[in-house]
């Protein structure tokens, strides 16, 4: 059932959800498909629609993917973090704690998603890679917004792609590695409560430029 949220509510309260994912409540396939049908309305370069969406419910497969993710996540989370003297610094410890929690519980999430796009932009110029990912990432974000509007949450993670992780995940899932690129690994679950609020961000005036830098 969709929540009674306005477009602005959905846009300003769709968070990276980790600690508030409900690890016990099943996620029906029909809800996932409903969200995906909405996401597939997103723009895609030359109307190619070269995307493929791999949902994972099987416990053993989820554990295999979570193990790949955890190896890279542990190394990443143990690195020193940048120091910010603003709203980013205020939440850094909470973000790190949340990310570590997800790493430890990834295999328990009801559903995982690996969105893929046909092609491999490895070592290509910026214009090529921007065009490539621009044909998938709008649809992924639309999917996350659709989840939020129905009381579910997710988090955009990419750490499983580091090193040989993408190829190992492709082997686990049977993805043709030479033909398809993975955009991330997304945990999907109903959220514990739906009362999410806008995040603290840098003021728009601090990051905007008019006519030139």
Image (cartoon, rainbow, N blue to C red):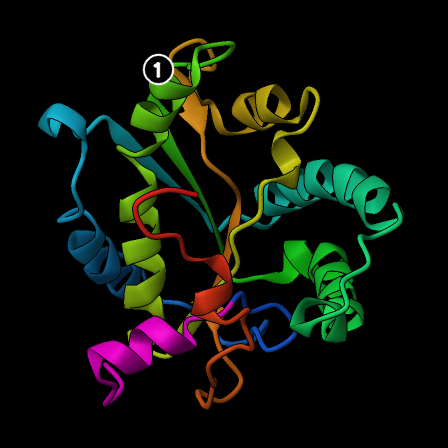
Quarter of the image that includes the N terminus: bottom left
Looking at the image, residue 114 sits to the left or right of residue 70; the answer is left
Looking at the rendering, the stretch of residues picked out in magenta corresponds to 1-15
The answer to whether residue 150 is seen in the rendering is no
Crowding around mark 1 (Cα neighbors within 10 Å: few <14, some 14 to 19, many 20+) is: some
Question: Residue 149's spot in the image, x, y percent?
Answer: 29, 76
In the rendered image, residue 8 lying in the magenta stretch gets the answer yes
For label 1, the SS is: loop
Task: Determine which quarter of the picture holds residue 83.
Answer: bottom right
Judge whether residue 128 is colored magenta.
Answer: no
Residue 123 image offset from top left, x and y in percent: 51, 9
Instruction: Left or right? Give the position of 58 relative to 39.
Output: right
Q: Is residue 27 above or below residue 22?
A: above
- Which quarter of the figure has residue 48? top left
26 up-or-down from 182: above or below: below
Task: Locate the C terminus by quadrant.
Answer: top left
| Residue name at image x 41 percent, y 57 percent | 208
Q: Depth check: 168 or 77 in front?
A: 77
Camera sees residue 105: yes
Q: In the rendering, at what x and y percent does residue 114 appear?
A: 45, 40
Q: Is residue 10 above or below residue 154?
A: below
Q: Quadrant of residue 116?
A: top left
Residue 155 place in picture, x, y as percent: 53, 59
- Seen from the viewer's position, the closer of residues 93 and 2 is 93
Number of marks in picture: 1
Residue drawn at the location 38% of the way across and 76% of the way down? 12
Instruction: Tell me what residue is drawn at x 34 percent, y 54 percent.
Output: 141
Residue tagged by mark 1?
119
Instruction: Locate residue 108 relative to residue 134 in the image: left or right.
Output: right
């Amino acid at each position: 059932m969709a929540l009674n949220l306005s477009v602005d509510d959905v846009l300003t309260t769709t968070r990276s959800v980790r600690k508030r994912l409900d690890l016990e409540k099943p996620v029906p396939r029909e809800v996932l498909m409903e969200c995906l049908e909405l996401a597939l309305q997103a723009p895609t370069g030359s109307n190619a629609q070269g995307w493929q969406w791999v949902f994972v419910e099987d416990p053993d497969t989820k554990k295999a993917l979570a193990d790949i993710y955890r190896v890279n996540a542990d190394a990443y989370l143990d690195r020193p973090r940048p120091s910010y003297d603003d709203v980013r610094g205020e939440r850094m410890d909470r973000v790190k704690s949340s990310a570590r929690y997800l790493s430890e519980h990834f295999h328990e999430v009801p559903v995982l998603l690996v969105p893929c796009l046909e092609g491999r932009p490895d070592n290509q110029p910026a214009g090529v890679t921007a065009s490539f990912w621009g044909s998938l990432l709008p649809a992924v974000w639309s999917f996350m917004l659709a989840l939020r509007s129905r009381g579910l949450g997710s988090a955009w993670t990419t750490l499983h792609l580091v090193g040989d992780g993408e190829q190992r995940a492709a082997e686990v899932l049977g993805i043709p590695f030479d033909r398809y690129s993975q955009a991330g690994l997304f945990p999907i679950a109903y959220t514990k409560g739906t009362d999410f609020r806008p995040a603290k961000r840098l003021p728009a005036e601090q990051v905007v430029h008019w006519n030139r830098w």
